[in-house]
Image (cartoon, helix red, strand yellow):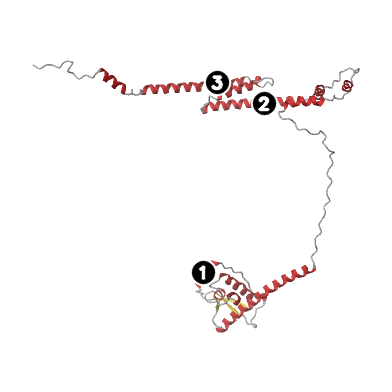
Amino acid sequence: MKRGRSSSDLDLPQNGNSEDERRGQDPEPVAGHTDSQNDINDEDESSHRRDIRSRYRMLISTVQQNREDMLNVRGNKITEVLDEANTLFKEVHQAREAALDSQLLVVASDLGKEKASQLFSEGLSFDPSTFVQHTLSFMGLNWLEDEGNNSEDEAATSNGILPQNAWHILASRCGLCFQSTPAFHYMYGTFHAEPPTPKLRVERQRKAPTKEAKRIMPTQLKKMEESHQEATEKEVERILGYLQHYHAQDPTSPISYYEFVINPRSFSRTVENIFHTSFLFRDGLARMYLDEDKLPCIGPVEDSAAEEPSSRKQCVIGISHWSWRVLRDAFEITESMIHPPKSRTK
């Protein structure tokens, strides 16, 4: 027969080992406990916010119901309400409670403005004569003293003269209202207030120009004008010579205006050629006409065929660097018909 296993043969864990294993294992967190704790914190916070809002509404209701007490000049209710609101505002962390705080501040500011206007209206009843009487009595002047005074100071006081230390008494009393020491200055000034004597303005004499200066300057300008005019006239005559020369070589062939004035290597020289050629048209020494292709041509005018100034027509043309390149490439101009002066080529 098979023998059954006894309790001693079973592999049961020992008490010491099981306790060690239990100690080594970390307890699993309980999710339900943390959620309930967060709910409790949210409920406490919401209840605290409700309490703050109820206190703000109570303050606003108190200010609106006790309006007359708040406007009392001798009372100090508005300050107490603002102090309580400042203490309550330290616990405000949400916009809803902050909106109630701003509403309370608006109501309190309206009451403060109205209370200040009442104080100003009472200040209009200020009596200067009464104030002066109180001030003089404070400085030591007493109009009710008997005439039989023995001392000279008392007699002078009774006659309406202030004692010697009257201003010191007033100064010591007024000094309590200021934190800084007033600067020392004379009541009527240290000197007599007299306007300063105006200083006489001496006009400087301008030096008259000498005869040499009068004579030299116009001479210089005249020489410059004459030299510029002579250079222009010489250049116009030189261009007229080129025009007559090309016309004499082939009188039947028209001379293109653009081929005549354009310098393919210099835009500035082209502008100068157009400028000097315009004098030929002005003086009637050259004429412009259109060929069969409706392109402008230029030619010299003989003395017998010269036009009268009244029958001439003038026009203004413009040229840019871009149009100069277009015309140069369109007419395939490689050489200038008007050669620059020798002074510029050197």
Q: Give the alpha-carbon distance from disc 3 to disc 2, as whole Å.
A: 25 Å
Mark 3 lies on a secondary structure that is: helix
> Would residue 31 be found to the left or right of residue 5 on screen?
right
Q: Quadrant of the N terminus?
A: top left
Residue shown at the point (59%, 81%) measured from the top left? 244
Residue shown at the point (60%, 20%) measured from the top left? 62
Q: Range of the magenta residues?
A: 114-118
Mark 1 / mark 3, whichever is N-terminal: 3
Q: Give the alpha-carbon distance from disc 1 to disc 3, as whole Å.
A: 90 Å
Front residue of 230/248: it is 230
Residue 116 is covered by the magenta coloring: yes
Residue identifier under label 3: 55
Q: Quadrant of the C terminus?
A: bottom right
Q: Residues within 10 Å of mark 3 (few under 14, many from 20)?
A: some
- Residue 332, x across and y down, in percent: 50, 74
Front residue of 174/304: it is 174
Most prominent secondary structure in the magenta stretch? helix
User: Visible in this render: residue 283?
Assistant: no
Q: Find the residue positioned furthest to the left.
A: 1
Mark 2 lies on a secondary structure that is: helix
Mark 1 lies on a secondary structure that is: helix
Residue identifier under label 1: 326
Check the image and report above or below for 28 versus 250. above
Say which amino acid is labelled 1. Answer: Val
The circle drawn on residue 114 is 2
Mark 2 / mark 1, whichever is N-terminal: 2
Q: Mark 2–mark 1 contact, CB under 8 Å?
A: no
Say which amino acid is labelled 2. Answer: Glu
Check the image and report above or below for 321 versus 57. below
Residue 62 is covered by the magenta coloring: no
Say which amino acid is labelled 3. Answer: Arg
